[in-house]
Image: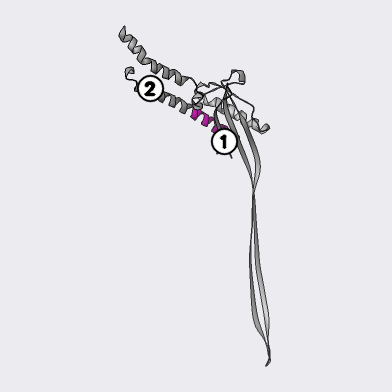
Amino acid sequence: MRRRVIVTLALAPVAAAVLASDVPEQAQPSMQLLAVRRVHVERLGGGETAQHVRDMMIASLQRSGVFLLTENPDKADAILRGSAEDLVFTDTFQSSESLNARMSLGIPDGSTTARSSSRRSVSAGVGENESVRIAERKHEAAAAVRLVNRDGDVIWSTTQESLGAKFRGASADVAEKITKQLVEDFRRARLERGLAVSTSVNANPFSR
């Protein structure tokens, strides 16, 4: 009976460490990501083009398989909100170069006196001008988003921008970058929690 009590007391700090790691702490926003399962993507600021970025984000997050996406904010563990823009513009480059050369030649005309002589002058000039104007149509997208829990605390944020990728447009690339960053931070937080629990168990001699 005494041995059973000792084992129970020895495992108590370990259990407390595990439970503490499961509960989000205000001082550890990254750990609060682990409590998020269901996400609602709010309408983004930035006009109608921003909603195209939002649709891309929803599709990208859904494909990741890490979070459940919901259209009902009341059922979400966290809200993803922010602003975005999707712009199409023309980038113009213009330059001008010129090259000019001039030559002058004096030739005696054959009439000479004691006090003067006569010369004939011939001059020629060559000029070349070159102008270059390049207009390139570009597509740029950018987004700044944050993940807010039910208490209104910001537990994660990122800013991403793109001029487009090889096989993706600018909006789709921004959405993929946001999803990739969020998933990486989520998995990093899960790994850190696992290491913290493992360290607590190894540090307790009664847990072996």
- Image point 39% across, 15% down: which residue? 12
The location of residue 68, given as percent across then percent down, is 55, 21
Q: Which is closer to the viewer, label 1 or label 2?
A: 2
Q: Is residue 30 visible?
A: yes
Which percent across, then down, holds residue 9?
Answer: 36, 13
Give the residue at mark 1: 160
Describe residue 207's horizontal placement relative to residue 157 as left or right.
left
Say which residue appears at 67% left-offset and 79% top-offset: 121
Does the stretch in magenta take in 7? Answer: no
Magenta segment boundaries in residue numbering:
175-185
Packing grade of label 1 (10 A; few <14, some 14-19, many >=20) is some
Q: As drawn, which residue projects farthest toward the top?
A: 1
**Residue tagged by mark 2?**
200
Which quadrant of the view contains residue 147? top right
Q: Where on the picture, by quarter, is residue 98? A: bottom right
Residue occupying the far bottom of the picture: 114
Q: Position of residue 135 (x, y in %)?
A: 65, 48
